[in-house]
Image (cartoon, rainbow, N blue to C red):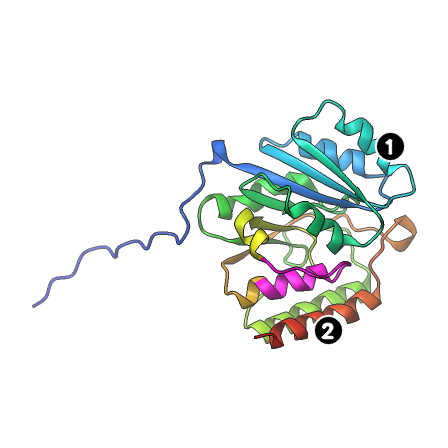
């Protein structure tokens, strides 16, 4: 009778784990008229126990954001501020990609809705060699959540359902602003969207490539429109078109 080993061999990860002590994390921070919140967001990034590079893209702000960034950048060697005319979140992210120096990239909104304190947990699956991309989910529970606006919640769940149907996956929050990548993965994406449609464009491309995507629950301190929230139902309609178009591409 044939003998079998007592334990099955462990399949090595497809990507070699990164040594945490030598892993650099680049934050891309698109900002448009976020003077009320951006300083606190940047200070929270500074306090993280990570080796960080911060790239802030001022997307044509008119509220004093540029002046705050000039003061913040003074004397910092691991930071970069890019100023451009107002073109949208997608254009801001694309402007930053060529300046990435880190091994891992975090897209960080400047509006205070996402807590940088969650980032050490989000980068872990990539550092461990298990993931190519990590999504921070606002809809999976387990972390502090401001109560969502009802129609925004409905829209987010619909877009996630559509994503799952189109790409045979199980994402709970495809529109999340917290997306974390191996740097080479983000550089390899073919991104063209200028506005909030960058979120479904990124999601569709990483799903279509069958990359290893992990989700982790995150805290979410959402804003109302009276507090400066910018995304609208029109962006949701645009997102549907982008998801379908990306699925139909060869």
| Numbered-mark total | 2
Residue placed at 44% from the left, 36% from the top? Answer: 19
Residue placed at 62% from the left, 66% from the top? Answer: 204
Residue placed at 70% from the left, 61% from the top? Answer: 192
Q: Quadrant of the C terminus?
A: bottom right
In the image, residue 67 lies at what x, y percent? 87, 32
- Find disc 1 in the rendering and name its residue: 67
Label 2: how many Cα within 10 Å (few below 14, some 14–19, many 20+): some
**Would you say residue 172 is visible in this rendering?**
no
Q: Quadrant of the N terminus?
A: bottom left
Q: Quadrant of residue 139?
A: bottom right
In the image, residue 128 lies at what x, y percent? 45, 45
Judged from the image, the secondary structure of the residue bearing numbered disc 2 is helix
Tell whether position 202 is magenta: yes
**Would you say residue 191 is visible in this rendering?**
yes
Q: Nearest the camera: 8 or 54?
A: 54
Tag on residue 241?
Answer: 2
Q: Nearest the camera: 20 or 93?
A: 93
In the image, residue 104 lies at what x, y percent? 56, 44
Left of 219 or right of it: where is 133?
Answer: left
Reply above or below: 20 against 177. above
Q: Which residues are magenta?
A: 189-205
């Amino acid at each position: 009778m044939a003998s079998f080993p007592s334990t099955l061999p462990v399949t090595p990860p497809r990507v070699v784990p990164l040594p945490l002590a030598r892993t650099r994390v680049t934050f891309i921070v698109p900002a448009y008229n976020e003077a009320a919140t951006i300083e606190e967001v940047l200070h929270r990034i500074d306090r993280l126990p990570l080796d960080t590079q911060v790239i802030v893209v001022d997307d044509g702000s008119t509220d004093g954001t540029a002046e705050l960034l000039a003061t913040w950048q003074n004397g910092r060697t691991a930071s970069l501020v890019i100023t451009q005319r107002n073109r949208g979140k997608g254009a801001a992210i694309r402007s930053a990609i060529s300046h990435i120096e880190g091994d891992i990239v975090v897209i960080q909104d400047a509006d205070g809705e996402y807590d940088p304190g969650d980032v050490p947990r989000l980068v872990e699956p990539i550092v461990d060699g298990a993931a190519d991309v990590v999504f921070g989910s606002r809809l999976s529970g387990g972390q502090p959540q401001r109560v969502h606006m009802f129609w925004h919640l409905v829209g987010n769940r619909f877009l996630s359902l559509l994503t799952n149907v189109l790409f045979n996956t199980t994402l709970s929050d495809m529109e999340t602003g917290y997306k974390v990548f191996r740097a080479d993965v983000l550089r390899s994406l073919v991104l063209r969207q200028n506005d909030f449609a960058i979120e479904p464009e990124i999601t569709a491309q990483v799903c279509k490539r069958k990359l290893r995507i992990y989700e982790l629950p995150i805290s979410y301190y959402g804003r109302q429109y009276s507090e400066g929230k910018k995304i609208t139902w029109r962006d949701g309609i645009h997102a549907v078109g982008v998801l379908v178009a990306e699925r139909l591409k060869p």
